[in-house]
Image (cartoon, rainbow, N blue to C red):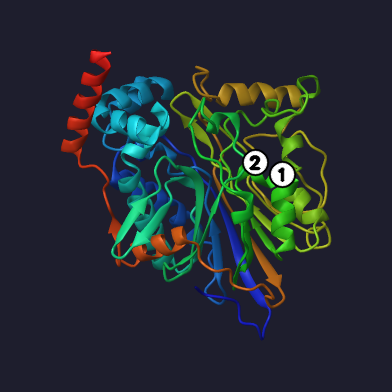
Amino acid sequence: MSSADPGSGRHFRALAVQPQWHAHDFTSAAAFRTWMRAQLEQARFHLVPDRPNLVVLTELNGLPLVLRGAPWAARLGTFERAAAALFAARLPRTLPLMWRERAGPVRALQLAHADDNARLYLDTCRNLAREYGVYLCCGSTPMPRYRRDGQRLRREPGTLTNQTVLLDPQGELIGVADKVHLTPDEERGGVDLSAGRLDELRVFPTPVGDLGVAISLDAFRPDVIDRLEAQGCTVLLQPDANGAPWTAKEGLPPDPAQLRDQPVAWLESSWTATTTGQNIRYAVNPMVVGNLLDLTFDGQSAITGRPEDAPTLRSYVLTEPRPGFLALSPWVEDGPPEQLRQTGQQLAARSGHARENAYHTEVLWADLNLPPSRCPVPPATPHEEALRGLLRGEARVHRAMPIWLGWLAMGALLARVLRR
């Protein structure tokens, strides 16, 4: 892994990519690679050749790969219908996973092709980091945990985390971070992911900062920020996918009677971490936009810093201008609050309005400076060693059950149920 030169300061450029996604971007490996590459191509115009570049992508940008190989499912209109149809179509894989690994149907559906999708995701990101010569925060994706056994990787049964992968410009793995605090949509009633462990969050020293990852909701949680602060994090990475209209009320209020506008709530994440923190100097928060089947995603990407580093007054829509924003994506329009709330509903999925899905995309950048790193390089976890071997071609995933055994297992399970 690359680390900062201890004898000099660090001067680099950070970029946040705010893309728009569509279901068809995930129905084939080629479409996914094209969509991901388009984001780096947008960023390319802002890369600088004389110092390192850090590119940060958005949360769950690999989640819709569950649609891969099934373009017909994307035409069913809603994720609930698509998931049900895919589960049935992939029954020889999904049903044995439910039985053997005690996975719910949605998690089993994702695990059925998790190894193939993980390989596609990692290979795509590694190639992009190499091609564009950047430090790459790949965003995040539902990913199993692996353990290396010689030349084989063995998947941890039943586990599927919201996971960020960090790569250097040679495509080498820097580190991995799991999301600790899941939203209701990510828990068993929704995407059904596994929560990460707080004590596994670490800081990775690099020429583009001492990187700590707080995926979306994690950046709002004091236990996550305090842990990264204590380890000397200087650059906070917050990949995000906000699944609601940006000008709607927040989805996770402490008290339903005290609902706030989402942009007001968002000030409690990266902006607060950089304007009030001790070690955290900068934060990069890219947000994906676009209607994915019947789901709405919207937001304003930002790069934040300390007030003295960003004295210009600006802020999210529906909030008062303030210092601390080094770069901020504009929303689709300015105007009074009621107009903005109405526009948010017009943009949303299945609104039927002429402006439906007409979101704003952006690439933000800021030139950042830090003193030499004093953070130690954390030891690699077994999962990181496994992914490192996979990326280097030294190991490959061991398939626990070939498809023909899946058919046999399904038959045995059905026979057992019928006997009861």
Q: Amino acid at mark 1?
A: Arg
Would residue 32 appear left or right of 89 to someone viewing this image? right
Determine whether 388 is above or below 400 in the image. Answer: below
Query: What residue is disc 1 on?
Result: 221
Numbered badge on residue 349: none
Q: Secondary structure at mark 2?
A: helix
Give the distance between the C-alpha atoms of the residues marked 1 and 2, in whole angstroms. 7 Å
On the image, the x and y values in percent for residue 162 come to 51, 44
Badge 2 is on which residue?
217
Crowd class of label 2 (few under 14; some 14 to 19; many from 20; radius 10 Å): many
How far across and down, in percent of the image, does residue 126 sit?
A: 39, 61
Picture coordinates of residue 233 (x, y %)? 69, 63
The residue at the point 72 percent across, 36 percent down is 263
Looking at this view, is 109 or 276 the one in front? 109
Q: Which amino acid type corresponds to the residue marked 2 in the rendered image?
A: Leu
Give the image quarter of residue 412: top left
**375 to 183, vertically: above or below:** below
What x and y, as percent, mark residue 258?
A: 80, 24
Please tell me which residue is depicted at 55% across the width and 70% down the height of the picture. Answer: 48
Q: Nearer the viewer, residue 20 or 70?
A: 70
> Residue at position x 42%, y 35% from top?
22
Residue nearest the observer in this picture, 45 or 108? 108
Judge from the rendering whether residue 150 lies leftward or rightward of residue 252; answer left or right.
left
Name the foreground residue: 110 vs 132. Answer: 110
User: Which element carries disc 1, helix, strand or loop?
Assistant: loop
**Dot 1 crowding, Cα within 10 Å, few <14, some 14–19, many 20+:** some
Contact, mark 1 vs mark 2 (Cβ under 8 Å): yes
The answer to which image quadrant residue 386 occupies is bottom left
**Left or right: where 125 falls relative to 339:** left
Q: Give the residue at the far bottom of this rendering.
A: 7
